[in-house]
Image (tube, rainbow, N blue to C red):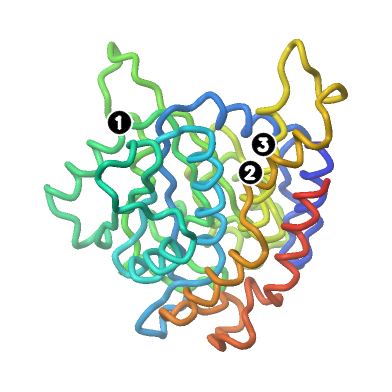
Amino acid sequence: RIEELERLVQCDEGARGILDFLPPVGSLELAAACLLGSKSVAIITGFPCMIDYPIPTETDGPLGSLAIARTLLHLGKEVIILTDECNEEVLLSCGAASGLMVNNSSASFSNILRMESFPAVAQMEEDDFSRLLHIQESVDLVIAVERSGPNSEGKYRTMRNRDMTHLVAPLELLLIDQIEEENLHKITSIGIGDGGNEVGMGKMYERILQSNVSNASLIACTVSTDHLIVASVSNWGAYALCGAAALLSCISSTSPASEVPREVLQKQLESCLPSEEQEEAMCRRMVQSGARDGVTGCSDVNQLMVDGMPLARSLEILSNIRTI
């Protein structure tokens, strides 16, 4: 079933050329197993590619990040979402609409979704780097969802090769080992992307350079992750990761997949994934807060879009994953 999920989200519906740099079959299952084995997770997201607008946030990324946060919280993990200051308003709105934001101080820590934002790299101060290091020391897994990553010159570029470095915080530093070797603290990482310029794509860097992706040599991200999920739309890759984790969580050495009752699998999938109604509400709230479709620039709440496609197509993928 997990390989079915993998195929479902990798058909390159956006025609970006991702078939040239798909990771090996089975990568999704490995990433899901990694997620299940984690205790405390940082999700980094935000791709401020709409640089001509006061709020440059696109609609791909936040929805997938909140879906993963939902799965992690259901599985009892600690979760924090990190983004750039320029994306903060949109992420907070999306989080509020998700129903996952908990402000009750009496709630157990594992039931609280935390969020933090960081300034662009040129504005980062010592306190900001200290905050980032503290987070690095407190998590054992980092998941990058549609997260802008640096190219070979350390610049952050859009798919159209426009420079957005002045907006992007260096959150990929979480993946760089800044801890003494004798310290056994180990961070594992998962990257989810759809274009070649996202954190994690360094794992397939040479193949991206040889691909048909426009501006590949100028935009390709050099930062690798332990596991990589490449999808037609990054949100779809995130949904697939949630679905795979839900399925794996029901399987054990004594109860292989073939023996797990369908109703048990279905209940877990429904708990780990947002409903179509929740996803639409979150997307609408994001657009109301200034987010735009990253391909067309559309910001019409009556015409919700993600990566140039109607939100309805993403909701179809979500429904298919829930019922696979």
Crowd band around label 1 with a 10 angstrom C-alpha radius: few (<14), some (14–19), many (20+): some
| Along the viewing direction, whichever of 254 and 181 lies nearer the viewer | 254
Left or right for 182, reference 304? left
Q: Position of residue 270 (x, y in %)?
A: 68, 47
Q: Which mark, by number, is residue 138?
A: 1
Residues under labels 3 and 2: Cα distance? Answer: 6 Å
- Residue lying at the far front in this picture: please name it: 106
**Residue 76 in the image: above or below residue 161:** above
The residue under the point 40% across, 70% down is 90
Disc nearer the start of the sequence (1/3): 1
Q: Are marks 1 and 3 in contact (CB under 8 Å)?
A: no
Give the residue type that dot 2 points to. Answer: Cys
Left or right for 82, reference 292? left
The residue to which callout 3 is attached is: 246
The residue under the point 47% across, 43% down is 223
Q: Which mark, by number, is residue 242?
A: 2
**Residue 42 in the image: above or below residue 33:** below
**In what element is the residue under mark 1?**
helix
Q: Which mark, by number, is residue 42?
A: none
**In what element is the residue under mark 3?**
helix
Residues under labels 1 and 2: Cα distance? Answer: 23 Å
Give the residue type that dot 3 points to. Answer: Ala
| Along the viewing direction, whichever of 153 and 254 lies nearer the viewer | 254
The residue under the point 81% across, 25% down is 260
Residues under labels 1 and 3: Cα distance? Answer: 24 Å
In this view, the mark in front (1 or 2) = 2
Crowd band around label 3 with a 10 angstrom C-alpha radius: few (<14), some (14–19), many (20+): many
